[in-house]
Amino acid sequence: MTKRQENALKTRQKLLDTTVDLIINGDFHTLNVEDITKACGCAKGTFYTYFKNKQQISCEVCRKLFDQIAQRMQQMKDKTFLERLEHYFESFMIEVERYDINICREWIRNVLDPKTSDEEWDNTKWQFDIKMLQDILKQAVKDKELKPDAPIELITHIIISELYGMMTCWCMSDGVFEPKDWTNKVFKAQVEPLLKPYLLGE
């Protein structure tokens, strides 16, 4: 990798890190590209070299966070598969709530009706979450933590439906429903009984 490529990667990452800070400490609706570039110390043209608009960079921020959750789960070698999956379930909702509720609303709006968005990074978010969770479950089968006959597709869709449902309730209640208060309860009541018949070595 050349020095120029290294600098480009650093600049792109700095834009992502700055956006995270601004989203967490401010209001997504009022945030604009100029706010990001000013806080980052770069020109607006630099931003558009890497990202189309604030929605695109916000979506990438979210995807990276969920990738990190999956990676942390794989590193938890001292935990059972059920404990690791509960960590994934809880971490998913913690990260969702850590960001502005308006980001969640905008993302849900585009995912619910992807035909209204011409942004590929919005249209594929559902598939992104499905694939990530399916990969986690398939790896558990390979590692002999789940039985080979475990219905991976069904389990994946049930878990994602629970997570998306809590996100939607959070948005519809204008923040009154707090997913972090319910993730453990929902996991114990819905996900754990679903998985128990297929667990190995628990």
Image (cartoon, rainbow, N blue to C red):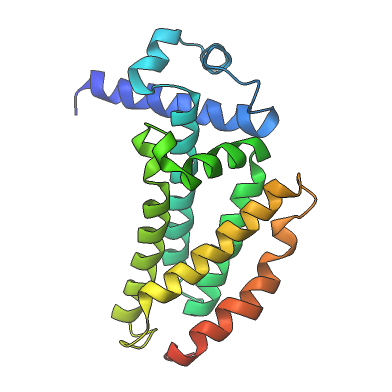
Quarter of the image where one finds residue 189: bottom right
Q: As rendered, which of 2 and 22 lies closer to the eye?
A: 22
- Above or below — where is 133 with respect to 174? below
Give the residue displayed 29% in from the left and 79% down from the top. Answer: 142
Please state the horizontal and vertical placement of residue 177, each as a whole percent of the image.
76, 55
Q: Is residue 95 left or right of residue 141?
A: right
In x, y percent, where is residue 52?
Answer: 39, 22
Front residue of 184 and 189: 189
Q: Which residue is most to the right?
A: 176
Indicate whether 125 appears above or below 140.
Answer: above
Eyeballing the image, is 12 above or below 64? above
* Residue 21 picture location, percent across and down: 61, 30
Q: Is residue 68 left or right of residue 87?
A: left
Q: Is residue 193 above or below residue 6?
A: below
Q: Residue at x 51, y 11 (%)?
A: 41
Quadrant in the picture for residue 60: top left
Q: How many discs appear?
A: 0
Q: Where is the N terminus found, in terms of image quarters?
A: top left
| Residue drawn at 70 percent across, 58 percent down | 180
Which residue is at the front of the view, 55 or 123? 123
State the image coordinates of residue 78 (x, y, percent, origin top left): 49, 76
**In the shown orientation, is residue 196 left or right of residue 152?**
right
Residue appearing at x 60%, y 49% in the figure: 95
